[in-house]
Amino acid sequence: MISIPGSPIAKILYCVFPLVLLLNCKPGSDPDSIISFHSPQLFPEGITFDSKKNGFYVSSMSKGKVYFVDRKGNISQFISDPLWISTIGLRYDPERNRLLVCASDFGGGERSSDKTKLKTAYLSAYSTLTGSKIFTSPLGHLANGEKIFANDLVIDRDGIAFVTDSSGGKIFRVDLEGRPSLFLSKNASEKTSLNGILLINDSYLLVAHTSEGKIFKIARDGKSEPEEVSIREGLIGIDGMSLFADGKIGVVLNRQNKIMILESRDDWKSAAKVFERSGKDFDFPTTSTIADGKLYVLNAKLGSLMKNEKVSLFEILSFSP
């Protein structure tokens, strides 16, 4: 058993985002570019690219807001919702000019409390044109009294969102009007620590399991058992995932300070690594987004959040596969 040092907040974060271990990672090539932005104690966990504004939305574990970062690193607040404690996964919906936001409470946000810690979770949709709210969908009641941590999401072609619950091992479905339902329960998936999620060809989901370091394939209708994708490489600490136009996926391994790009030639029954980077440029990366055919990786620096360290500089690193 691993002994988790530090505060109760660090222990909770370990369950959702396992601690960075000092592994022997081979250093890779430098990133193509680094976008640095200043915002004291922001600790952004999620990122998504807005192709129409040519910039990035980032979330905040500590402040529970959403910010916009341009290509030069200028940052401005985009959305503040009084219901949010911590903002986590983000997804831009260009077809409908929406930004979808996962909001939860891991216990270390500026407005965290015992009443909300691992008990409150929402999926919210906001207009990227006006910043106005479209809906906020409460998810806590679907947890059936268990702990809940809405982490990441994906959107299908009809605007339906699928949301992973890292604490309860569930996947929620939220329709275009904001009506939530339970898509997959722990009893069916037998998986907690669910994290990044992708939708492939609008027919099945790929879901990351952080602590086991695996990816599972789940049918779009949720009626069949999840199938493990056979991957030779260990993916311990797998967090966010991004889908390239050519079908490859980028994965972020927060625990290893590493990124990989995986390719499948058998409809994701198995996959192989075709690209890897690791080393000094990474500082607890959590997730990524695609822009201009490149993988843009967010340095969340959550290790510093666990240690209650002061941090004001964060980075978005780009890599060409």
Image (cartoon, rainbow, N blue to C red):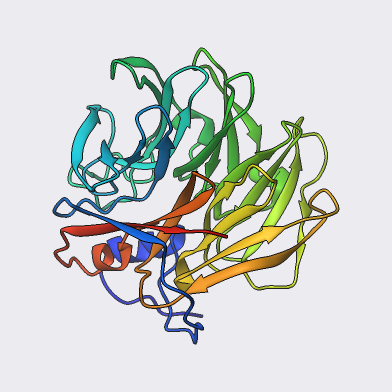
Q: Is residue 296 above or below residue 152?
A: below
In the rendered image, the quadrant that contains the C terminus is: bottom right
Residue 231, percent from left and from top: 74, 66
Task: Name the residue rendered at 42%, 38% in the picture.
Answer: 49
Q: Is residue 181 above or below residue 119?
A: above
Q: Is residue 107 above or below residue 285?
A: above
Q: Is residue 212 left or right of residue 42?
A: right
Q: Nearer the viewer, residue 228 or 272?
A: 272
Task: Name the residue rendered at 31%, 62% in the picture.
Answer: 302
Residue 78, percent from left and from top: 24, 30
**Corner quadrant of residue 67:** top left
Q: Which of 293 and 242 is in front in this view?
A: 293
**Corner quadrant of residue 87:** top left
Task: Name the residue rendered at 74%, 48% in the picture.
Answer: 217
Q: In this view, does 228 lie to the left or right of 154?
A: right
Q: Is residue 98 above or below residue 295?
A: above
